[in-house]
Amino acid sequence: MAQHFLLSAASRTLSLRSIYKAGEDAAYAMFCEMRWPETNGEAVCPQCNHDEAYKITTRRKFKCKACAHQFSVTSGTIFASRKMDFVDLLAAICLIVNASKGMSMVQLSRDLDCQYKTAFVLAHKLREAIAQEVHTGEVLDGHVEIDGAYFGGHIRPANMKSNRVDRRLKKHQTGKRRVVVAMREREEGRTLPFIAMSEGEGVALAIENVSRDATMSADEASHWDALHDGWMTDRVNHSEIYSDHGKHTNMVESFFSRLRNMIQGQHHGVSPKYLHQYANHSAWLEDNRRTDNGTLAHIVVSNAMGAPVSRNWKGYWQRAA
Ligand SMILES: [Zn+2]
C-alpha cells in the first residue's frame, strides 16, 4: 500500500529541533531574507526604498543612510509589535503548519509557554497571512464543486423535556448561526470559502468567483438550480446517492469535514466573528495537504512579511542547522 503523505520523510523538512538548534541569530537572519528577498536579506528602507542602512546591532534596528529613518525587519508587517523572540515565532509557525486540523490557542500557549493572549493574537495574525494564499482574487476554473454547511449557534436542549423548545424556530435561535459556502476545484485545485447567512447566497458568490468556462457540481438543493443558467452543471441528489457516475461533491465535502474537525476538535465552537478565519485556514490546509511543512512555513512567513512568495524553501532548515 502507498504510504500516506504525512508519514513520509518528504513531508518533514522542518522541525522544532532544527529551529531551536539553529538558534535566535539564524531565525533572525531568516526573517531578514524573507522580508528583503531581492537583496538577499540586506535591509531596504520602508520609507524611501534606499538599500543602504546602518545596522544598530544591539537593538536589531536599522537606520537608513539616505533618510535616517529607523526601522526593524518587522516594521510595517503583521509582526510589527512583536515581543517574542524570532525562534519562538518560527516555532509557533512550525506548530501551526504541522497541525493538519488546526490548533487551539490554549495548546499553542502551552507549547510555547507564553500567555494565552499572546498565542491568540499570534494565531490570528498567522491566519491573516494564510488567508492571502486562499483569497488571491483569481477566479476558479475547470471542474468546480459548490456546497454550503452551517456552523455555530448551537442551542443546548434543556434538561427536562417539558422545558425544551423547538430549536428550528427563528425566535429560539441565537443569531450566531452562519453558513460557510465553499467552492473547490477538482484535481489539486483551490478551495475558496465564504461566510453567508444562507446557502442560497452561494449563487452570487459563484458568479463573482467562478470562470464562465468552468463546469460546476452541486447537490439537489433548489437554490442551486440557478447555476444552470451560468454553467454546465452536474447535480447529485444526496438523499439517494453520494456519487453518481462522477457526479458528486466529495471534494468540497472533505473540506467541510476538515473544517468541522478543526472547530469541534480544537476550537470547541466558533463565533461568527472568527468563522472566516477558520474556514480560510482549513481551505489552505486542504489545498496544501501534500506540501512539506518547511515549504508551508516559508509561505506563511513570506506572506506575513509582505514579500512575494518564493517556493524555494526546501532544504533551508537543513542548511541553517
Ligand atoms: Zn530611507
Image: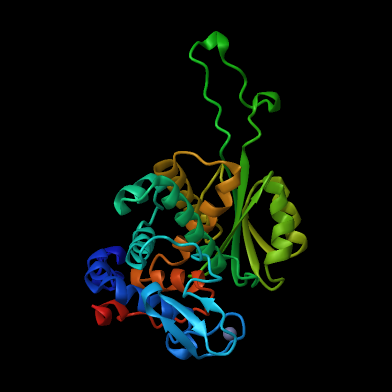
Say whether residue 147 is left or right of residue 59.
right
Q: Position of residue 313 (x, y in %)?
A: 37, 80
286 up-or-down from 197: above or below: below
Q: Position of residue 32 (x, y in %)?
A: 42, 79
Q: Position of residue 307 (x, y in %)?
A: 52, 78
Give the color scheme: rainbow, by chain, secondary structure or one colour.
rainbow
Q: Residue at x 52, y 41 (%)?
A: 270
The N terminus: image quadrant: bottom left
161 up-or-down from 18: above or below: above
Q: Position of residue 173 (x, y in %)?
A: 64, 28
Q: Residue at x 26, y 64 (%)?
A: 16
Give 29 or 52, whichever is nearer the viewer.
Answer: 52
Give 205 or 244, whichever is nearer the viewer.
Answer: 205
The C terminus: image quadrant: bottom left
60 up-or-down from 55: above or below: above
Q: Quadrant of residue 90?
A: bottom left
Q: Residue at x 32, y 54 (%)?
A: 112
Say whether residue 240 is left or right of residue 296.
right
Is any atom of residue 244 visible in this view?
Answer: no
Q: Quadrant of ligand 1?
A: bottom right
